[in-house]
Amino acid sequence: MSDPGPTPEISLMVPLYNEEGNVEPLLDRIAQVMSALGRTYEVVLVDDGSTDRTVALLKKAVTERPHLRVVFFRRNSGQTSALAAAIDHARGEILIPLDGDLQNDPGDIPVLLGKLAEGYDVVSGWRKNRKDPFFTRTLPSKLANGLISLISGVKLHDYGCTLKAYRREVIKPVVLVGEMHRFIPILASWQGARVTEVVVNHHPRVSGKSKYGLMRTFKVVLDLLTIKFLGSFLTKPIYAFGGAGVILFGFSFLLALYTLWEKFFEVPTVWVHRNPVFLVAIFFALAGMQLIMMGLLGELLIRIYFASSQTTPYVVREVMESKKVRSEE
Ligand code: UDP
Ligand code: MG
């Protein structure tokens, strides 16, 4: 990164893994759309450890074409990591990720920008007319989208669509791992961003093949669990674990009382320690104690987490200061 030049308004971000047939048509199409738009831009391309001619084509493109910035990974690290790297290297005020296989249409970029100009912070693409195999991709994705929208409370139709547009300040604090990139609008919305969606085009893949199948939906559901947990309890793990722990203690207490009642009023011949209900009470008490301890450990962890990262448990929109000078000065 020698002379970085002036900061562009818009950064397009494209992950590429073995997309040799798509690199050039994609760059042509992007150049066509962006030059018609007349705003300053850059294209951050991330080669996610391709083993075909993608690397060579990107090296050639970066010497021949303007506006490009290419990051090469040593090995394949997945689409989310590629996107995270693209975010780290992007300098624009508006960040727009899109797939490198031309399934997303760069022609939709002006529509996304229009929505941002209306005052939104995140505009998510909705592939209303999706061109992917029905049973392995489109149907599971529909179900997953319903679930995500229910659990997150952020109502979008198509979280999985890569084509989205973000204002830089809402995307920078987000930590990306696993299949998390689809949850950025949710994380951003939880942090107070204004989120909307627009219908975008979707094309069948012309060259190369998809890297995903049904398994992806399972990963997405597990990631959903993680973000829900982090979203609700990151700052207060003791409420989640401790809460469950206290409930178990409550059960344990009631069961212990029941054992005593049985001993004195029902079957005095059965000793308390021979009564299986008493064992269950002990089990609940132990489990409850463990959960409370886990909650305390969690509290310790989040203190380390916030102290060791730049993250804060709150989000500031703006800080204002009065201009008036104090009277004694
Ligand atoms: N991709 C990547 N690393 C991976 C898998 C995929 O960078 O490990 C890129 C891929 O080159 C494409 C985008 O992510 O630009 C979406 O991948 P794909 O088209 O396989 O997904 P689908 O459209 O089938 O959901
Ligand atoms: Mg694709």
Image (cartoon, helix red, strand yellow):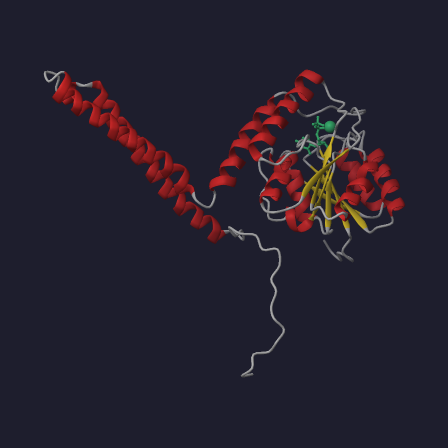
Considering every residue shown, the one lying at the far left of the view is 269
Q: Position of residue 125 (x, y in %)?
A: 73, 35
Q: Is residue 207 above or below residue 308?
A: above
- Foreground residue, 316 or 253? 253
**Residue in the picture at 37% in, 34% down:** 244
Considering every residue shown, the one lying at the far front of the view is 265
**Residue in the picture at 68% in, 25% down:** 211
**Residue in the picture at 84% in, 50% down:** 39
Which image quadrant for residue 187?
A: top right
- Foreground residue, 15 or 94? 94
Question: How many numbered dots are placed on residues in this image?
Answer: 0
Q: Position of residue 307 (x, y in %)?
A: 47, 53
- Foreground residue, 196 or 294? 196
Instruction: Give the quarter of the figure containing the C terminus.
Output: bottom right
**Residue in the picture at 21% in, 27% down:** 256
Which image quadrant for residue 220?
A: top right
Q: Is residue 27 left or right of residue 220?
A: right
Q: Is residue 294 left or right of residue 222?
A: left
Q: In which of the image's four quarters is ligand 1 placed?
A: top right
- Foreground residue, 7 or 254? 254
Which image quadrant for residue 288?
A: top left
Q: Is residue 296 left or right of residue 143?
A: left
Q: Position of residue 100 (x, y in %)?
A: 76, 34
Q: Position of residue 60 (x, y in %)?
A: 82, 41
Q: Is residue 166 above or below residue 267?
A: below
